[in-house]
Image (spheres, rainbow, N blue to C red):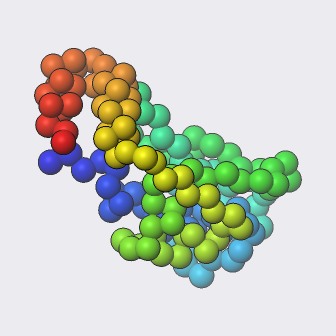
């Protein structure tokens, strides 16, 4: 079963740790998450993972946040205000939250199908067509 993108396929604990480090907050448990180096809370440079839909997997240390240069952080994601699956404390770290409601879930699914066809499955057109047909 294709699960990528479900709330439990992300690492909300690593996100929470990284957001706290960006805000300059001390972290009680500094255990590292695989592929994501943990700098000390006093460091100005914080390495963060990224995601490339064309590759289909997270990329460790893709982005660098520099507290001496950046004053605003914009986070975008489906589960940033989710209230289950370990995401509960994440929303409290944001000063401003904006929720965008859509008129039609069908419209979102159609856009997802197009994105997946253009990225994840571009080398496997038959697999893309099969996946698209399996969507509701």
* Looking at the image, residue 104 lies above or below residue 80: above
> For residue 129, which quarter of the picture?
top left
Q: How far across and down, in percent of the image, does residue 62 sit?
A: 57, 41
Q: Position of residue 119 (x, y in %)?
A: 37, 26
Residue occupying image coordinates x 71% and y 53%: 73
Q: From the viewer's side, name the closer residue of 135 and 6.
A: 135
Number of on-image labels: 0
Q: Residue at x 43, y 47 (%)?
A: 103
Q: Residue at x 21, y 25 (%)?
A: 128
Residue projecting furthest to the right: 68
Residue 73 visible somewhere in the drawing: yes
**Viewer-proximal residue among 101 and 72:** 101
Judge left or right: residue 98 versus residue 52: right
26 displayed left or right of 106: right
Image coords of residue 99 (percent x, y): 55, 58
**Could you tell me residue 90's position as x and y percent?**
55, 70
The quadrant the C terminus occupies is top left
Determine the residue located farthest toward the bottom in the rendered image.
Answer: 28
Q: Residue at x 51, y 62 (%)?
A: 80
The relative height of residue 56 versus residue 82 in the rendered view (above or below) is above
Left or right: residue 41 compared with residue 89:
right
Quick check: can you spot residue 116? Answer: no
**The quadrant where residue 79 appears:** bottom left
Q: Nearer the viewer, residue 52 or 30?
A: 52
In the depicted structure, whether residue 121 falls above or below residue 10: above
When asked about the image quadrant of residue 115, the answer is top left
Q: Position of 117 compared to 28: left or right?
A: left
């Amino acid at each position: 079963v294709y699960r990528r993108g479900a709330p439990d396929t992300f690492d909300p604990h690593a996100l929470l740790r990284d957001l706290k480090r960006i805000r300059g907050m001390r972290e009680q448990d500094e255990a590292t998450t695989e592929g994501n180096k943990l700098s000390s809370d006093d460091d100005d440079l914080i390495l963060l993972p990224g995601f490339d839909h064309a590759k289909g997997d997270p990329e460790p240390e893709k982005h660098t946040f520099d507290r001496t240069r950046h004053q605003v952080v914009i986070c975008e994601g489906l589960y940033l205000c989710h209230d289950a699956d370990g995401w509960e404390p994440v929303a409290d770290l944001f000063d401003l939250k904006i929720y965008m409601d859509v008129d039609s879930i069908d419209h979102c699914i159609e856009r997802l199908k197009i994105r997946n066809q253009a990225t994840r499955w571009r080398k496997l057109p038959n697999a893309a067509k099969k996946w698209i047909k399996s969507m509701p």
